[in-house]
Image (spheres, helix red, strand yellow):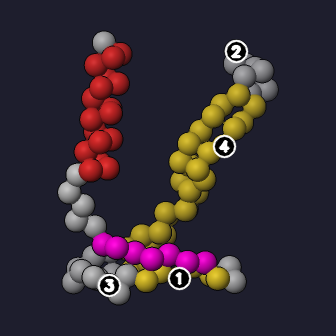
Amino acid sequence: MAGRFRRQRREVHRQGVEGNRNGVAVELSVRDGEVFIDWTRRKPRRATYFLVAYLRTAVSPIGRGENAGRTLKEFNIVRGFHSLGR
C-alpha cells in the first residue's frame, strides 16, 4: 500500500514540475532590506499578487513527553503571507 502512495506522490510532483504553467514570470530582488518585485514582462489584466515568506527547514529538539530526546524536522514553514495588490 505504501508503495502505491509513493508512486502517486511522485506522479503529482512530476506533473507539477513538467506540467502546464499558466503563471506569471516574476523577478524578485532584495536591496537594503526592501523587497522589489518586477512582473512587467507579462502582467495579466486581472490577478492578485501575494508574497509568501517561509523558512525552508527547521530542526526542533523535543525536551519532554514520549518523544523526549528526539528532534522534529520541519520543512517549508510559512512565516508570513502578504497581499501585494492587484
Is residue 43 within the magenta segment? Answer: no
Question: Which residue occupies 33% across, 17% down?
Answer: 3
Mark 3–mark 2 distance (CA, rounded to whole Å)? 54 Å
Which structural element holds mark 1? Answer: strand
Q: Which residue is mark 1?
A: 36
Residue type at tag 4: Ala
Q: Earlier in the sequence, mark 3 or mark 2?
A: 3
Residue type at tag 1: Phe
Label 4 near label 1: C-beta < 8 Å? no
Question: Which residue occupies 30% across, 12% down?
Answer: 1
Write the start and end of the magenta stretch as one range.
24-30
Q: Earlier in the sequence, mark 1 or mark 2?
A: 1
Q: Earlier in the sequence, mark 4 or mark 2?
A: 4
**Picture coordinates of residue 33 (x, y %)?**
68, 79
Question: For this view, does 58 lie left or right of residue 48?
Answer: right
Mark 4–mark 2 distance (CA, rounded to whole Å)? 21 Å
